[in-house]
Image (spheres, grey):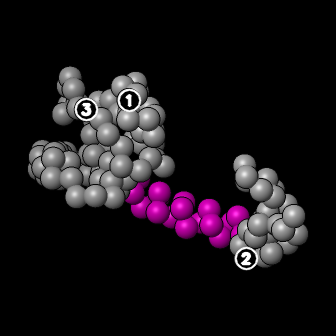
């Protein structure tokens, strides 16, 4: 399986091999191709589920592939997928809480465009 490395450039045809589900994390509406023996991968269920989570539009092809993969999934694949999914949701939730508690009020950062200051709840752009 390969997915476009740079989705922002429609002319780019560079693809990257997906060696684990985590490689797809953080992508939005990834585009790619399934090739080779992807159906035999032990983590294919997790990869397809990550693709479904990352897709914001209706994708009948991906839904069909997910249904096929789910139907033929082994018990360990289903278990691993459920564990990884639950761990990811917990991690995402904890990350927000931990960051909020670890960042002291008054901390400043540069976000690439402007300086921001943390007011205890959110980052606020500093007025120049």
| Magenta residues (range) | 79-100
Q: Can you identify the residue that label 2 sits on?
A: 121
For disc 2, the neighbor class at 10 Å (few under 14, some 14 to 19, many from 20) is few
Q: Quadrant of the C terminus?
A: bottom right
Q: In terms of sequence position, does the residue under pointer 3 or pointer 1 come before the other?
A: 1
Residue 54 is one of the magenta-drawn residues: no
Q: Position of residue 98 (x, y in %)?
A: 69, 66
Which numbered disc covers residue 11?
1
Residue found at x 55% / y 67%: 93
Q: In terms of sequence position, does the residue under pointer 3 or pointer 2 come before the other?
A: 3
Q: Position of residue 44 (x, y in %)?
A: 27, 40
Depth-wise, is mark 3 or mark 1 nearer the camera?
1
For disc 3, the neighbor class at 10 Å (few under 14, some 14 to 19, many from 20) is few
Secondary structure at numbered mark 2: loop
Residue found at x 65% / y 70%: 97
- The part of the image, by quadrant, that contains residue 1 is top left
Q: CA distance from mark 1 to mark 2?
A: 40 Å
Secondary structure at numbered mark 3: strand
Residue found at x 36% / y 49%: 29
Depth-wise, is mark 1 or mark 2 nearer the camera?
1
Residue 87 is one of the magenta-drawn residues: yes
Q: CA distance from mark 3 to mark 1?
A: 16 Å
Left or right of 95 on screen, residue 73: left
Secondary structure at numbered mark 1: loop
Q: Position of residue 11 (x, y in %)?
A: 38, 29
Which numbered disc covers residue 28?
none
Q: In terms of sequence position, does the residue under pointer 1 or pointer 2 come before the other?
A: 1
Q: Can you identify the residue that label 3 sits on?
A: 33
From this viewpoint, which residue is outermost toward the front? Answer: 128
Q: CA distance from mark 3 to mark 2?
A: 41 Å
């Amino acid at each position: 399986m390969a997915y476009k490395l740079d989705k922002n450039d429609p002319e780019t045809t560079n693809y990257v091999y997906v060696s684990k589900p985590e490689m797809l994390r953080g992508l939005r509406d990834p585009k790619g191709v399934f090739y080779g023996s992807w159906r035999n991968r032990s983590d294919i269920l997790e990869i397809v589920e990550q693709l479904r989570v990352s897709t914001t539009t209706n994708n009948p092809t991906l839904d069909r592939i997910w249904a096929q993969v789910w139907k033929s999934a082994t018990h360990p694949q289903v278990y691993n997928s459920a564990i990884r999914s639950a761990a990811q949701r917990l991690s995402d939730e904890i990350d927000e809480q931990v960051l909020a508690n670890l960042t002291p009020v008054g901390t400043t950062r540069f976000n690439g465009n402007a300086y921001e200051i943390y007011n205890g709840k959110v980052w606020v752009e500093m007025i120049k």
